[in-house]
Image: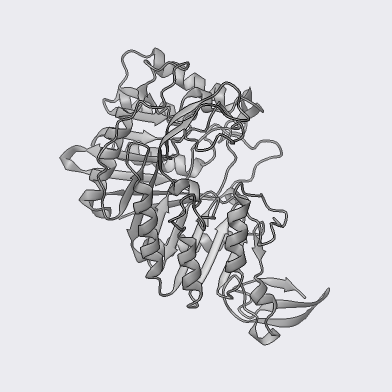
Amino acid sequence: MIDVIFDYKSDYKYEKGKYFNNYGCSPKILQRIMKYFDDNINEIESICISLYLFNNEILFNKLNELAIHGIEVNVISIPLEGYDDSKPKDIYEYETGELLYKDKTKYELAKNIYDKIKNETMSKLNLYVFPHIYVRSSKMNPFSRGRMPYSMHSKTFYVRMRGNKEAIGLTSSNLAVRDLVKNEVLVIGDGNSFAKEDYSAACQFYIDLIKSSKNIKEFDETHNYSNIMEMKNVLLSSNSYYIAPFYDDVQRTVRNRIKEIIDGAKKRIYICAEHICDYETYESEEYGFLKNVIQKARNGIDIRCLSQTFVDENGDNHDQRKPANIRNYKIFMKEYIKYSSCKYAVNENVHSKYIIVDNTLILTTCNFTPTQFTYKKDINIERFEKIPGMSYHGTYSEVGCFIVINDATVCNEFVKSFDRIWQDKETYIHNNVSLLTKNDDERVCPWCNSPLELKDGRYGKFYGCTSFPKCRYTENV
């Protein structure tokens, strides 16, 4: 049975200013992961866990406890240089609300953990640094932290137990302290939850990832490790895909599989991610899967997109967070708004990343942008226009995971979560041009697809959903 856990910002009521706690950005998800490890502590032989950020002392203490118990624990994360060393904040104790640390940055929190592991001589807790950075243009702006963007965006774990039992976990959350709480998801499956080939693919991914990393005790922050990786023969399953610079262009395989699933849609396509703009690509012969979504829109399929960033076809962000790739958003939205079956919503707390196609779920640690589906070997940049003294020679690729789950029960759980965020009071609903030009008797609710009707209210006329009170969508005249 697949275990699904959702964490929502709206579930936490913080006192003013007390936004950061020692359990990190997803307390509920962190607690569930630790409980899974505790429940199986006498069966677990080894744990491999990859985290974009590893600065959570609660998680570190739990992993160290497991290592002392005799379990081999391997953590793979990024170099310290990649952690934000600006804007220190107070950290509060999660359960009591008492001040725990004064003025701490993500870097300081991570350094404390990295130094403890580096200086430990007996523990079976190993920390590996994956130092790969990914860039493709000499025109890029300086990154917000560190010298360059690090590619390790996987947030997964693989567990080997006695009796050939295995487990896979995948989350959208960084589990980081000093990250704001967002809407996140965790999926854990063991035993018959996944096929044998899915566990094998996860196991091989971690073997290859560790081989392409450096143990923290041997890592030199001043050394350029851009090309330490050797190409591997990727072990693909029909439902698990791991992208990495040491796997040759798996991204193309993943995108084609997504297109194939979308092309088979009969009823619904729901897309949720921080960024959604995989329409045009960086390769002239390729196109993004959102063009397949538009094709299904022509057939009247129920299509909804829910993201954290947004601009419309004119580049107007409607007071929402703007994406980096404004051009692709504009091109996509120009087509998207033509169809009344297509709805778009924006919520600043969206961080989960998945696609629901009928009763198939595509769950990932990646966003749905051209960047995540791009693989370029032999990048050679001798000089950056805006970053003096830097050069880059390597492979452009992120590290991430995509898992396809064919399970109606799991899909329905994700649909309920999707609808909860869609109807959240902080969610902005973008009205399609095609809806606005319809006659009154043809207007459709963007939340539930029920007809809208013109009503008289306290402050004048408005359009209300005919499914009220089950659905409370309203729209000004």
In this rendering, position of residue 351 left or right of residue 87: left
Residue 439 is at least partly visible in this image = yes
Which quadrant of the view contains residue 78? top left
Which quadrant of the view contains residue 377? top left
User: Going 43% across and 30% down the picture, which residue do you hit?
Assistant: 132
Most extreme residue toward the right, as rendered?
459
Q: Which of the image's four quarters has the C terminus?
A: bottom right
User: Going 27% across and 28% down the picture, which residue do you hit?
Assistant: 71
In this rendering, position of residue 335 left or right of residue 210: right
Vertical comparison of 286 with 444: above or below: above
Residue 423 is at least partly visible in this image = no
In front of the other: 16 or 130: 130
In front of the other: 286 or 297: 286
Q: Which of the image's four quarters has the N terminus?
A: bottom left
Please state the horizontal and vertical placement of residue 306, each as a whole percent of the image.
56, 59
Vertical comparison of 163 with 121: above or below: below
Q: How many numbered tags mark residues here?
A: 0
Please state the horizontal and vertical placement of residue 46, each as a whole percent of the image.
26, 32
Please state the horizontal and vertical placement of residue 245, each as a whole percent of the image.
37, 37
User: What kind of colouring is applied to the model shown?
Assistant: one colour
Most extreme residue toward the bottom, as rendered?
441
Vertical comparison of 153 with 223: above or below: below
Please state the horizontal and vertical placement of residue 239, each as a whole percent of the image.
30, 55
